């Protein structure tokens, strides 16, 4: 292979034919250049295929022009909309004068018991929305698994990862950081109703800690605790707990029955009714999903 | 008009980000860059939503001292909506990346035109 100039390499990378990671991993590039050239020349020699190719070529020449025109139209339209919009920062815009949002603030503390109004909104008033979000995460993991787990017997991308392993700096950093990251994630989840935070952000921190640990050490270490089986159990339990608790709270709250979850003293850790358990369920789902994405994309399995 | 645009500059920045994302989505042939463009478009949506709820000089909606006067706090609703958006965008990105990886393993290129060409050739050769 002839040495290419930096500009040509960049151009190839931009068009998607070149992969930096292959070079750094020491894996030879897929050597289909001979076959490709031959096929390409044969392809251009056959007349009926060449016409199809020229259509594609003409399309690809006109495409940027139309895309540019469409972009121009979209930007102009959106800027015209912004000129008509109510001024920024003002409390008198329709969105900020809405009765609903001020009711959340006025009676959110007494009705949900959550000091953090946003947590009260997303896990009490609009908890159905958050239930859907957790299921979107679950469905995304299932879709990624369907796409990536299908053909794992054929090729094992183990070699690419072995560069990262046995890295002394990474391992020592992970040793120091992972306990604190896990603690910080748990803190964010458990204080979701008292301050900024909640299940989603805390779960993302927990997932980051798991990813750091798994990439620094051999993944088998983490797989003893978090493998396919325990992943299934955790996500299933968290999602069904969420669904069941919300069914119960809709039923009891809407009919004025007594609930076993009171709002408690605002500001105490065991307050705000269902928000704390729901935050924990959401945090577990998010952490498992983050780590699951990483594991499936790198190793092809959890 | 220019003054209105200056007063609403956060929304203007959101529109510019949206345009950058849309351009990346339309004009790049690389599938990974299309995904990056879609993520930039998502970000512009979050910026737009949060800017709608912001009111200068007010506190974040955390009632730590028990004062529930609505004129002290910013609008809490856009924060909740943005949270939904972020989660959905993460999920969509993961599914798109998985599909792209499958395409790469099948055709050994990320260039969309190249993939079209290979698919076209295979369809011609098959019957």
Image (tube, coloured by chain):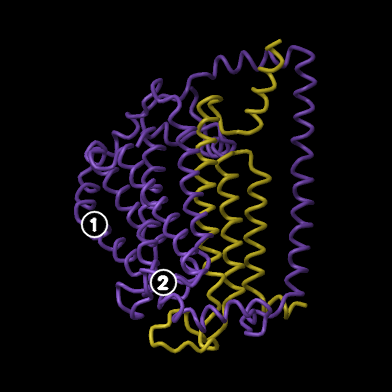
Chain colours: A purple, B yellow
Q: Residue furthest top?
A: B127
Q: Are marks 2 and 1 on the same chain?
A: yes
| Picture disc at residue A32 | none
**Would residue A15 be found to the left or right of residue A86 on screen?**
left
In which chain is the residue bearing label 2? A
The image shows residue A35 at horizontal and vertical percentages of 56, 14
Q: Nearer the viewer, residue B1 or A183?
A: A183
**Would residue A48 be found to the left or right of residue A259 on screen?**
right
Task: Say which element carries label 1.
Answer: helix
**Would residue B41 be found to the left or right of residue A246 on screen?**
right
**Would residue A41 be found to the left or right of residue B35 on screen?**
right
Q: Nearer the viewer, residue A282 or A206?
A: A282
Q: Is residue B12 above or below residue B90?
A: below
Residue bearing the label numbered 1: A177
How many numbered callouts? 2
Q: Residue at x 56, y 70 (%)?
A: B78
Q: Residue at x 67, y 64 (%)?
A: B15
Q: Residues within 10 Å of mark 1 (few under 14, many from 20)?
A: some
Mark whose residue sits in front, 2 or 1: 2
Residue bearing the label numbered 2: A258
Q: Nearer the viewer, residue A252 or A236?
A: A252
């Amino acid at each position: 292979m002839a040495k290419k100039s930096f500009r040509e390499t960049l151009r190839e990378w931009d068009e998607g034919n070149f992969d930096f990671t292959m070079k750094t991993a020491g894996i030879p590039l897929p050597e289909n250049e001979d076959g490709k050239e031959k096929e390409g020349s044969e392809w251009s020699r056959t007349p009926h295929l060449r016409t199809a190719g020229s259509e594609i070529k003409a399309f690809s020449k006109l495409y940027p022009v139309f895309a540019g025109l469409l972009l121009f139209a979209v930007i102009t339209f959106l800027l015209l909309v912004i000129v008509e919009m109510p001024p920024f920062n003002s409390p008198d815009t329709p969105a900020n004068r809405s009765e609903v949002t001020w009711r959340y603030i006025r009676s959110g503390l007494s009705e949900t018991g959550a000091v953090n109004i946003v947590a009260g909104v997303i896990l009490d008033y609009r908890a159905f929305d958050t239930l859907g979000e957790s299921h979107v995460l679950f469905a995304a993991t299932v879709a990624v698994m369907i796409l990536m787990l299908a053909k794992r017997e054929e090729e094992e991308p183990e070699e690419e990862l072995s560069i990262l392993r046995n890295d002394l700096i990474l391992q020592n950093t992970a040793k120091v950081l992972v306990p604190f990251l896990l603690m910080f994630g748990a803190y964010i989840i458990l204080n979701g109703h008292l301050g900024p935070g909640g299940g989603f952000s805390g779960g993302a921190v927990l997932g980051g800690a798991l990813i750091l640990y798994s990439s620094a050490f051999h993944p088998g270490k983490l797989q003893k605790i978090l493998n396919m089986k325990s992943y299934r159990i955790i996500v299933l339990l968290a999602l069904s707990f969420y669904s069941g608790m919300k069914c119960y709270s809709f039923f009891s709250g809407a009919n004025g029955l007594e609930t076993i979850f009171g709002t408690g003293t605002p500001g105490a850790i065991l307050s705000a009714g269902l928000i704390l358990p729901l935050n924990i369920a959401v945090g577990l789902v998010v952490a498992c999903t983050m780590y699951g994405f990483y594991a499936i994309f790198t190793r092809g399995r959890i | 008009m220019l003054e209105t645009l200056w007063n609403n500059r956060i929304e203007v920045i959101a529109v510019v980000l949206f345009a950058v994302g849309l351009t990346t989505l339309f004009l790049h042939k690389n599938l990974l860059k299309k995904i990056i463009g879609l993520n930039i478009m998502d970000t512009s949506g979050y910026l737009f939503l949060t800017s709608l709820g912001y009111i200068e000089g007010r506190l974040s909606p955390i009632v730590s001292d028990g004062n529930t006067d609505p004129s002290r706090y910013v609008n809490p609703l856009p924060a909740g909506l943005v949270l939904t958006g972020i989660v959905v965008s993460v999920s969509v990105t993961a599914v798109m990346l998985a599909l792209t990886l499958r395409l790469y393993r099948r055709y050994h290129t990320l260039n969309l035109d190249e993939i079209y060409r290979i698919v076209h050739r295979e369809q011609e050769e098959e019957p």
